[in-house]
Image (cartoon, grey):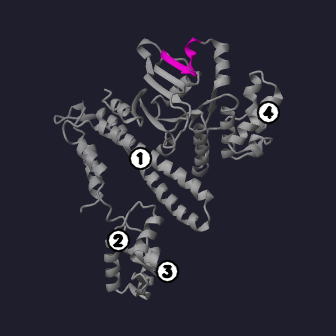
Amino acid sequence: MSNAPSNDVILRLDNVTRVHGTDGTAVRALAGVSLDVRAGELVAVMGPSGSGKSTLLNLAGGLDAATSGQVIIEGQSIGTLKGDALAKLRRRRVGFVFQDFNLIPSLTAVENVALPLELDGQRVGKARRRAIDALSMVGVQDLADRYPDKMSGGQQQRVAIARALVGDRRLVLADEPTGALDSHTGEGVLRVLRERCDAGAAGLLVTHEARHAAWADRVVFLRDGVVVDSTGTPDTAEALLEPTA
Amino acid sequence: MSVKQGLLALLATEPMYGARLRAEFESRTGGTWPLNVGQVYTTLARLERDGLVEAIGEDAEGRISYRLTRTGRAEVAMWWASPVTRETTPRDELVIKLALAVTVDGVDVNRVVQTQRTATLRHLQDLTRLKQRATTHHEAAADGDGQVDLAWLLVLENLIYAGEAEVRWLDHVEARLVREANRPRKSADGIPTTVQDGTTDSATRMVSNALKGGTR
């Protein structure tokens, strides 16, 4: 589906493991997961509850730290970054889209989208212009001055996608973004996400619905913290389909 | 799908000759269920014999058009008014394959499930791409074309929901196999044991479900 160069890796997970607890009580939430998401690509992650989907997304966005292995965003390994530097990288490079939109209710759509740029030190006027551009890309520029409670769920989620990809951000991490929407509206949101990836963004979409995962270029299936299926190239998939016991 | 009912429904719109009927049927269903023209003419001959359609002469190119008789119109009305029955659901190879997989020694059932899920997800991705294209086309189309696009979109969405249901069922099978493997069982002498394979009860249920699918 994408026309972007295939070698532009925006997100790389290299043999990432996350263990919660220690010794006797240790639980492996993720075990040796490797995954690349390139510019122009939307990758879906599926799996039952507790399979490690959310852990994977949190690690990819620098909200959680890997026990071993590396998470690399646009060439930068985030494991070596300390608090402020990590926050800055997140602000500049990574956007999140959540099930319940997470817009700030006291800010208008354009103010919500401009916020990460302003926090990053950009002047208000420039941040606003870039926010309007981002709103236009998801087709809701007319709602720029509206507050979240005056927007439908689908409109709020489009604003959230605009916020995720405002400015130079190219990586969008979406956690069940259609979970709170009816089927038709949810599909509209997926189309927007798909279009943004076709235009060069890199997307990681966590979902439990195959119908939604099918919008992705590749679907990765997790079970007990391990990748068990992938609809990647047949060779890779064959290798992954070896019994994992 | 009964070809007979499909042709009758199309003839209710206007008289048509065989090749046109075939083309109309395929364009409205996106070519998902191709008809061969021989099948169309055989069906038309049977419909004519049964008094449901009648020939209305040849055109300049020698093509014979057919129209509905009064009985034919009644038949179409009856078809629209009745539900589609599922009594003759065809056997589902996947259901039978899994039912056999849990009962035949030496089969890695999880691998069967995973292989199928990967294939079904790929199929869903293909369908979703087609749907994305069809939706874009539909939004740009004029009225007449738009109706045909709509029909094709509905067919695609049916296939997508069916694929999704299959993936959900495969997830369910996988989870059930895990539960089953850990389930304490009573052995012949009444002492509970944990069964690691030989999941006879779930196999029985699956076979029974597969057989309900049809007995052709």
Question: Whole-Å distance between the Cαs marked 2 and 4?
Answer: 62 Å
Residue at the farthest left position: B189
Q: Which residue is pictured at 30% across the width and 30% down the height?
A: A243
The answer to whether residue A57 is above or below residue A70 is below
A97 sits left or right of B184 in the view? right
> Label 1's element?
helix
Residue B123, which numbered label?
1
The first of marks 2 and 1 along the sequence is: 2
> Label 3's element?
loop
What is the x, y in percent for residue B110?
Answer: 31, 36
Q: Which residue is pictured at 61% across the width and 48% down the height?
A: A188
> What range is drawn magenta here?
A67-80
Q: Do badges 1 and 4 share one subunit? A: no
> Label 4's element?
helix
Q: Which residue is pictured at 58% across the width and 24% down the height?
A: A61
Q: Nearer the viewer, mark 2 or mark 3?
A: 2
The first of marks 2 and 3 along the sequence is: 3
**Protein chain holding label 1:** B
Q: Nearer the viewer, mark 2 or mark 4?
A: 2
Q: Are marks 2 and 3 in contact (CB under 8 Å)?
A: no
The amino acid beneath tag 3 is Glu
Which of the two residues, B202 or B174, is positioned nearer the viewer here? B174
Q: Which residue is pictured at 28% across the width and 53% down the height?
A: B210
Check disc 3 and report the residue beneath it: B14
What is the x, y in percent for residue B27?
Answer: 47, 65
